[in-house]
Image: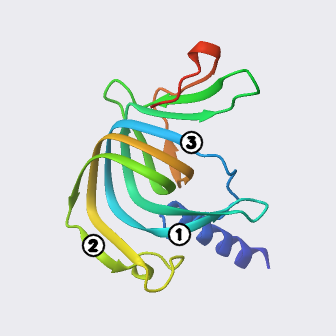
Amino acid sequence: MMVPATVVAGGIVLGMANGAIAASFAVSGQTFKVSASKLDGDGFKQYGGVVTEKDGTPHPVAISEITDAKLYDLCQSVDASLPGVPIVLTINAGGDGNPAKASGMLISMDSLEGDAVFTNIQIGRDATDLSPEAKAKSFGQSADKVVITDLKQVARSTSAGTFTLTGLKLKLNIGASAKPCF
């Protein structure tokens, strides 16, 4: 009896790692910022969706899936301020030409900026052709490859099958040094 359950669980984990199944969890309701000098990704899909807080509060988002990504000079920041005390938690990785790497990456975001180059892009696809989680007849786009330089993103969640943070530096910045990535 445990063998079929293990096979099913393993298939779900494998599907999540390959970006075939979206990881489902309640979002915090707080956004975070991500910047990178360059994102180099293979297997790009994008469509609209909704993420939900634990109390049921919905947030419309743009969902991006990237099969394999390299992020150079990655910075992630979240505002953790207390009343009267500015606090920002930062994570840096992927510097000195050694990128952070992610596979099966799924990002739910509010905004994205940068200079982008898409290879073999298809715009206006039915989003359910890209993800079974998408709303039928909704807008979607896909590309074989995406390169975004000077990336600036405000996100609500990120998940990945594997996320390798080369040269990881996590820091709690308090007071005058409490600056976000951008």
| Position of 155 relative to 87 (above/below) | below
Q: Residues within 10 Å of mark 3 (few under 14, many from 20)?
A: many
Applied colour scheme: rainbow
Task: Residue lying at the far front in this picture: please name it.
Answer: 84
Quarter-of-image position of residue 26: bottom right
Q: Position of residue 91 (x, y in %)?
A: 54, 30
User: Could you tell which of marks 3 and 2 lies nearer the N-terminus?
Assistant: 3
User: Could you tell which of marks 1 and 3 lies nearer the N-terminus?
Assistant: 3
Q: Position of residue 71 (x, y in %)?
A: 38, 40
User: Which residue occupies the foreground of this view, 179 or 119?
Assistant: 179
Q: Which residue is mark 1?
A: 49
Gap in angstroms between the C-alphas marked 1 and 2: 17 Å
Q: Position of residue 98 (x, y in %)?
A: 35, 31
Amino acid bearing label 1: Gly
Asked whether, in this view, residue 23 is left or right of residue 111, the answer is: right
Quarter-of-image position of residue 121: bottom left
Quarter of the picture containing the N terminus is bottom right
Gap in angstroms between the C-alphas marked 1 and 3: 18 Å
Q: Which mark is residue 97?
A: none
| Badge 2 element | strand
Residue at 51% in and 80% down = 135
Q: Which residue is mark 2?
A: 123
Q: Which residue is mark 3?
A: 32
Residue at 47% in and 26% down = 167
Quarter-of-image position of residue 83: top right
| Badge 3 element | strand
Gap in angstroms between the C-alphas marked 3 and 2: 27 Å
